[in-house]
Amino acid sequence: MRNIPAGTPRPAETEGRPRRRRVAADADKPATSPRATLWTPAELSAALREVSEKTLANWRSSGYGPPYVKVGTAVLYRQSSVERWLEQNEKLSGEAA
């Protein structure tokens, strides 16, 4: 146990004072990590269902498909970029593919 110096107010003696709370500077912002918005090819393949990881690799090498980021040797897709790419490639019924 630590020694408390004489004259230090005890909790009962501080009762009229408002308690100070330590709050992180960004406590009002949602806790999102950059990783939460990045998908691996396996995760994107699972999300798109009909597109295999091999197809994603072929698209990357041919310059087609959603934009991606390389971090070292890892290939990652930003969720927002994938959603934007899907919207840009959306086809209406009866429209030529």
Image (spheres, rainbow, N blue to C red):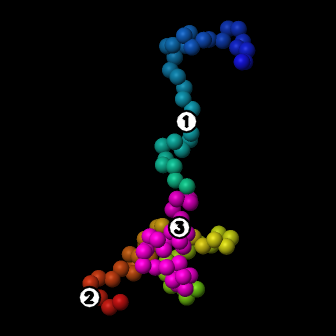
Q: Residues within 10 Å of mark 2 (few under 14, many from 20)?
A: few
SS of the residue at dot 3? strand
- What residue sits 73% from the left and 14% below the top? 3
Q: Earlier in the sequence, mark 3 or mark 2?
A: 3
Q: Outermost residue toward the bottom?
A: 96
| Callout 3 amino acid | Trp
Whole-number angstrom distance, CA of label 1 to CA of label 3:
31 Å
| Amino acid type, label 1 | Val
Disc 3: which residue: 39
Write the start and end of the magenta stretch as one range.
34-59
Q: Nearer the viewer, mark 3 or mark 2?
A: 3
Q: Nearer the viewer, mark 1 or mark 2?
A: 2
Task: Select label 1 or label 3 by which is in front.
Answer: 3
Q: Secondary structure at mark 2?
A: loop
Seen at 52% across and 59% down, the residue is 36
Q: Is residue 77 visible?
A: no
Q: Is residue 19 left or right of residue 7?
A: left
Q: Secondary structure at mark 1?
A: loop
Give the residue at mark 2.
Answer: 94
Tell me whether the residue at label 3 lies in contact with that at label 2, contact meaning CB atoms closer than 8 angstroms: no
User: How would you rate the neighbour count of disc 3 (Cα within 10 Å): few for under 14, some for 14-19, many for 20 or more?
Assistant: some
- Quarter assignment of residue 90: bottom left
Return the residue at label 1.
Answer: 23
Residue 47, percent from left and from top: 44, 70
Q: Residue furthest left?
A: 94
Say which residue appears at 49% left-offset and 13% top-offset: 16
